[in-house]
Amino acid sequence: MDMITATDVRFRYEEESGDATAVLNGVSLTIRQGEFVALLGHNGCGKSTFAKHCNAMLLPLGGQVLVRDMDTRSEDLVYDIRSTVGMVLQNPDNQLVSTIVEEDVAFGPENLGVPPEEIRARVDEALKAVGMYDYRKHAAHKLSGGQKQRVAIAGVLAMKPACIVLDEPTAMLDPQGRREVMDTICRLNRENGITIVLITHYMEEAVLADRVVVMDEGKIVKEGTPRQVFSQVEELRALELDVPQPTELCFALRREGVTLPDDVLTVEECAAALLQQLP
């Protein structure tokens, strides 16, 4: 089943001067249920704008976005669409609304009118899913950045979405916080079958996805598995994007005449390939 189907989506922001800035210029993309998709592109390419179309935060000015066959432009379906696709933003402080962790996670279900006993079950389940159950009575503002982001994810999980869109959720975190959040995202996808759309500038995070989609100037210019996309080092550089460091190292060595594969993604794969070159 398809989770999100975007067809020739176009969007522009109206400026105070009356001019319009085109941000999406005919984006067509299908995201399948249970898939983990990483969305890449330099700043201003339209990826965050597209993400907001996935749960009707923004509506297309041209084309169509369907969430499980529900048209995002149908006002009667907004509740169902946003219950299906949850959004996690870059700064967790912008999503924390209560002082105590479990109260924050309960906020969404309470607004949906979920019965109290069901809210209790959802909160506990969501906090356990992100590894934050032991912190349920803690003050949210005293948590680390990674912990706050996991609580923000739990708050979305408590709404029972089938898909979560995450807009650079690790951008403001230290390496430990980034690992915590990415471990959580991968576990939710692999073990719970939740569809993940991840916007990121960190190529080592994109490597974990099933599929990588690259945007430029409001259009999709590349898509494929991480190996397929990141093997195109020079093309990605032309789009002002990096590649994973092991991929970069092997690319540089190949240019010096060392025979190495062009689809290396991880440190382990890089080490194994280099070992094979030893006499």
Image (spheres, helix red, strand yellow):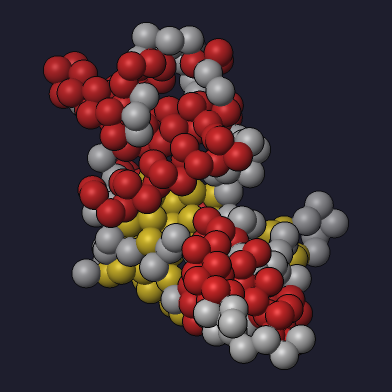
Left or right of residue 88, residue 221 in this image: right
Left or right, residue 47 beside residue 249? left
Q: On the rendered structure, is 246 left or right of 131? A: right
- In screen coordinates, is 195 left or right of 95? left
Residue 231 coordinates in the image, percent (x, y): 58, 81
Please name whichever residue, 116 or 260, is drawn nearer the observer in this view of the structure.
260
User: Quadrant of the image for the N terminus?
Assistant: bottom left
Residue at image position (56%, 23%) is 144
Q: In which quadrant is the C terminus drawn? A: bottom right
Residue 106 lies, with reference to residue 268, above or below; the image says above
Residue found 43% across the figure and 10% down from its top: 138
Number of labelled discs?
0
On the question of residue 116 being in view, the answer is yes
Residue at 31% from the left image edge and 68% from the top image edge: 32
Can the viewer see residue 108 in this picture? no
Residue at 55 percent across and 13 percent down: it is: 142
User: Where residue 102 sits: x, y (%)?
Assistant: 35, 16
Residue 166 image offset from top left, x and y in percent? 49, 49
Residue, far right: 17
Q: Nearer the viewer, residue 238 or 119?
A: 238
